Amino acid sequence: MRAIVVVASELEARRLSNLDLTLYVSGIGSVNAALATMRAIEREHPDLVVSTGIGGAYPSSGLQPGDVAISSEIVYGALGAMDGARFLDLAELGFPLVGEMHNRLPVWQGAASWASRANAAFGPLLTLETVTGDDEIALVLERRFPGALTEGMEGAGVAHAALLAGVAAVEVRGVSNMVGRRDRSSWRLPEALDAVKGTLARLDR
Ligand SMILES: O=C(O)c1cccc(C(=O)CC[C@H]2O[C@@H](n3cnc4c(=O)[nH]cnc43)[C@H](O)[C@@H]2O)c1
């Protein structure tokens, strides 16, 4: 199986080097991620695209900085409409995203066994356009998507482009911070990326 890896930043790519995996740097956000994935697929013809990097863990996930989460599904967490305080997702609005799919995008069938082999948490991973910086909004997102483990800004873009190209995708987030009130001094980038590196090394190819 030929796998390629998409990360948002050069900093992440540097820390994940020496893995014998082809790395693409997309830039921040789901649009950058989708465009970079599309180009990478045209060039490399992979069987699997792995979206990875640092991410924030939701308080109810039980995860801590330095832990890793692998996606059971990749979710556009804010694509929809607000009706007062109620979030209406694309299904409720009646707008399919791709085929019959709405906010939740499927992942590679090997994701669960990879998570168990790598001792990583396994569950829904959210994609947002904004880093959540408030405890109340973190709670709102947890209620909107029960069981969500982490948030990042690229996974759904990668999964969306891969889905359109007929290629499998999976997201892997190393927890750098807890989702909630912004406290940049508590972010643990090296620990998160070293944990991602260990997880990528356990990918069966
Ligand atoms: O606020 C800052 O000072 C700051 C400094 C460096 C980086 C940032 C980012 O916002 C990085 C966004 C980047 O990292 C991923 N990420 C990491 N944690 C989270 C999160 O809690 N929520 C959403 N995204 C997160 C994301 O995928 C981006 O690639 C800020």
Image (tube, helix red, strand yellow):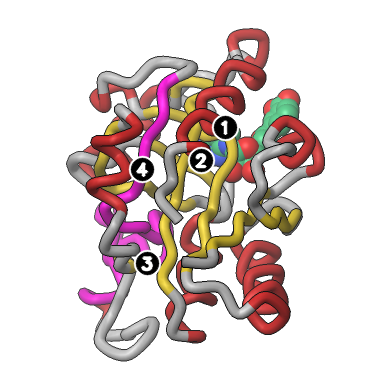
> Residue 24 versus residue 33: which sits nearer the camera?
24
**Dot 1 corresponds to which residue?**
197
Label at residue 81: 3
Q: Which residues are magenta?
A: 67-92
Amino acid type of the residue that numbered disc 1 sits on in the rendered structure = Lys
Of the two numbered discs 1 and 3 in the rendering, the one whose residue sits closer to the viewer? 1
Foreground residue, 92 or 5?
5
- Mark 1 Cα-neighbour bin, 10 Å: few <14, some 14–19, many ≥20: many
Tag 2 and tag 1, C-beta contact below 8 Å: yes
CB under 8 Å between callouts 2 and 3?
Answer: no
Q: Secondary structure at mark 1?
A: helix
Q: Nearer the viewer, mark 3 or mark 4?
A: 4
Say which residue appears at 79% left-offset and 35% top-offset.
14
Looking at the image, which residue is at 26% across and 27% down?
Answer: 61
- Work out whether mark 4 precedes mark 2 in sequence or the reverse, and give the earlier one: 4
Residue bearing mark 4: 70
